Image (tube, grey):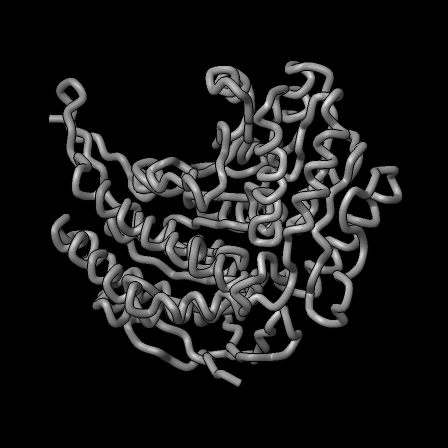
Amino acid sequence: MKQFRQFYIDGQWVDPLEATAFDVINPATEEVFAQISLGSAKDVDRAVKAARKAFDSFSNWTVGQRVALLERIIEEYERRFDDVAWAITTEMGSPIGFSRGLQTPATLGHLREAIAVLKSYKFESMLGKTRILREPIGVCGFITPWNWPINQITAKLGSAIAAGCTMVVKPSEFAPVSPIILTEILDKAGVPPGVFNLVNGDGPTVGSAISRHPDIDMVSFTGSTAAGIAVARDAAATVKRVHQELGGKSANILLPGKHIDISAPYGMLRAFTNSGQSCIAPARMLVPESEVERVVGLLKAAAENLVVGDPSSETTTHGPLVNRRQFDRVQELIKSGVDEGARVVVGGEGRPSGMNRGNFVKPTVFADVTPDMRIAREEIFGPVLAVMAYRDVDHAIEIANDSIYGLAGFVSADDLSEADRVGRRIRAGRVYLNDKPQDETPNYEFEAPFGGYKQSGNGREVGLFGFEEFHEVKAVIA
């Protein structure tokens, strides 16, 4: 069993001031493969002091110095690429092909985009006779999830370093090993002491301490809407900036047309990406009433190609869910779909045939889903797709927008301009038009802002918009 009991504070690996041992479990085998320490508010305070001290000098680094640092991080990350991919697969169950193909490479996209933005950004401008300065916001606290454990850190980290901010990071305790490897990479790349600090822990203790800390200027949180509300409440007393990327229940509108032969099966695959553990997963497939049975047949056929199994195998397409709690929640929601009258097209309750351990879920497709059902309203975070019928375009848009969430939307049509007209009416922070399989034409644009409307959060990540989140605006009037 691997031991990762220390935290990274002020450029050194240090023992926690108050430590509680925590087992990291491989979700495919349900066996402990590593152990970390859960820290305390005292550990957070020590990390914040280091970050505050480092900010005075790091915030004055030149653009050239920051670019050079980001380039060194990329170089070291590429050297440890396979280590990161292994860790993601082992700690949260991502199939190794997916870890190598998307989870791990995403960091390189974020860092390269941060460099591009930094090189071209104008930190000073004139507005009439007023000089406008953009300055780094200060010490940032990052609280990140387990589903994309490295992607969610580096989406923030790249922009923060480019802006000249320092940070204290709490990754998920359920997927902490890949962030520890990332920390080793940052140390090797020469990130100055105090610029990046890592404190492991749970949300109610370490996460809350970060949100409440008076010397943290901004907290950036990615996770569930319920947890985001707690973060915002904790942060309110110190009036710090709160940046959040929260839950989603994205709708995928299939307009009438020949494209359905491709877009329906791919829509299912998109919904099941990362075993459905993605906040933008298009978990509601909206289909013309006259096309429902055709789509059901297409989804049944496509589901035969899904391979649920050992995430370390190159042939596996879908691994386990991250932990037993998530497994139980998904099972409970699948049962609710059955109880409320939805028709099971593929999958259903329980593990796949032949599996008696591991947090494996049958990829499940429901038809005859109505907007009042739980599987149509709640974020499931598992491989569960709800097929919903609509009468006309206005009805489809009404269903799509009938959600507390607004993170993403998807529209497919034979005519791209028609998809665009519909996409403009979806209340979401990101809309994908004629989304295509990522192994053919990746639809991941690292410069595109990421964030949501409504209870999917506030603020934006990555690219120019993400970079500007880490700045204050100063007006100089002479």
Location of residue 41 in the rendering, given as x and y in whole percent from the top left corner: 49, 67
Tell me if residue 467 comes above or below residue 31 in the rendering.
above
**Image position, residue 191 (x, y; %):** 24, 65
Looking at the image, which is closer to me, 406 or 292?
A: 292
Residue 437 located left or right of residue 80: right
Residue 472 location, quadrant: top left
The answer to whether 7 appears left or right of 133 in the picture is right
- Nearer-the-camera pick, 110 or 415: 415
Q: Nearer the viewer, residue 372 or 265?
A: 265
Work out which residue is located at the far bottom of the displayed protein and give it. 1
Q: Nearer the viewer, residue 38 or 64?
A: 64
For residue 397, above or below residue 234:
above
The answer, for residue 216, to whether it is visible in the render is no
- Which residue shows up at 43% across the image and 50% down it? 219
* Residue positioned 49% across, 27% down in the render: 433
Left or right placement of residue 50 versus residue 287 in this view: left
Q: Is residue 164 left or right of residue 412?
A: left
Image: 278 above or below 436: below
* Picture residue at 33% right of the left edge, 49% below the top: 110
